[in-house]
Amino acid sequence: MVAGRLVSPFEVPERAQRMADGLAAIGLTVEEPADFGMAPIERVHADHYTSFLREAYQEFRAITGAGSEVLPNIHPYVSAGPDLACRERPRAEGVVARAGWYVGDMACAIGEGTWRAVYASAQAAIAAAEAVVAGEDEAMALCRPPGHHAYQDRASGFCFLNNAAVAAEVLRKRFKRVAILDFDTHHGDGTQAIFYRRSDVFFGSTHTDPRRYYPYFSGYGDETGFGEGDKFNLNLPLAEGADDEAFIDANQKLIVAALACEAEAIVLSVGWDAHAEDPLSKLAVTSDAFRRLGRIYGEVPLPTVIVQEGGYSLAAIESVAPRFVTEFLDERKP
Ligand SMILES: [Zn+2]
């Protein structure tokens, strides 16, 4: 839903196909990930939330006159009272109430194939992280749907399971500290929240200034982590209209911060939606910036899991994803 209108979704299956085609054209092969089960997903997400994602569609369709997809039409008001504020899950049991509790916005319709897709998307991230745990220097997870707006118990912004967070937890088996760096043009609010009180996973993000841009309620520069996680969160919002130089400069600052906190491995949340041709972009970033970023991230001397987030111009992502990966791999050749 955009400004009160139902519109055709931006997050469509063709995105993954276009990127797979573009990556195949530079000689990469797409492998189907193995199934690592629910355990790595539930290191990040609450079991009552994943149960909801799994069951919601069937339960919803049993309602007389229900629409074709689960969408929330009621939202809890946490400030209503202490009982609601400290509650981990809703007391109400029906799917309408649970959709209100667990689904943050109108960009997360749950259809018949949603669970299958989000589960497979998470498995791709797990497989890439497992490959790096096993000794690969880099692996890319072509995740769809994306994940960085998903919280431990909430879907929003096309995201249901937080693939980057799940990958980071897998990497923690081998690496003492992991940095998740995110250059999708939207702030990775879900990732930030998941690790906000932790120092073993640093989160750094550059994105469009959220004062007038999704996800609006987080992504500000003064959000630096809390408690144990203090100083392990870095947000570098970009003004609308920011160009290649500003975008690249912010990414370089993220890398410096990740190295300064002694991260031993990187999860890179890559979104191509900063691109000026992207239907959601407010920036003036060109294809060349992503080529340069490939080189810059390729130079970082740490094992890296690349996790696909957003990017909604089909033409742009088909050319930009392979450009980034080509430069990244070229830089890492021994
Ligand atoms: Zn995005």
Image (cartoon, helix red, strand yellow):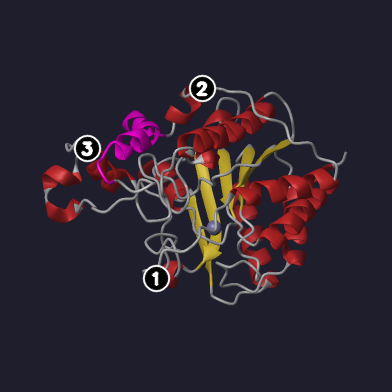
Start-end of magenta stretch: 45-65
Chief SS of the magenta region: helix
| Residue 6 position in % (x across, y down) | 41, 63
In the orientation shown, which residue stands out farthest toward the front?
Answer: 65
Indicate which label's residue lies in the foreground, 3 or 2.
3
* For residue 49, side relative to residue 162 (left or right): left
C-beta proximity under 8 Å, tags 1 and 3: no
Mark 2 crowdedness (10 Å alpha carbons): few <14, some 14-19, many ≥20: few
Q: Amino acid at mark 2?
A: Gly
Q: Quick check: is 101 in the magenta stretch?
A: no
Q: Residue 252: x and y, percent?
A: 66, 59
**Amino acid bearing label 1:** Ala
Amino acid tagged 3: Gly
Q: Which residue is mark 2?
A: 37
The span from disc 3 to disc 2 (Cα, nearest Å) is 27 Å
Q: Ligand 1 shows up in which quadrant of the image? A: bottom right
Q: Up-down: is 219 above or below 151?
A: below
Dot 1 corresponds to which residue? 3
| Mark carried by residue 94 | 3
Separation of residues labelled 1 and 2 (CA atoms): 38 Å
Q: Secondary structure at mark 3?
A: loop
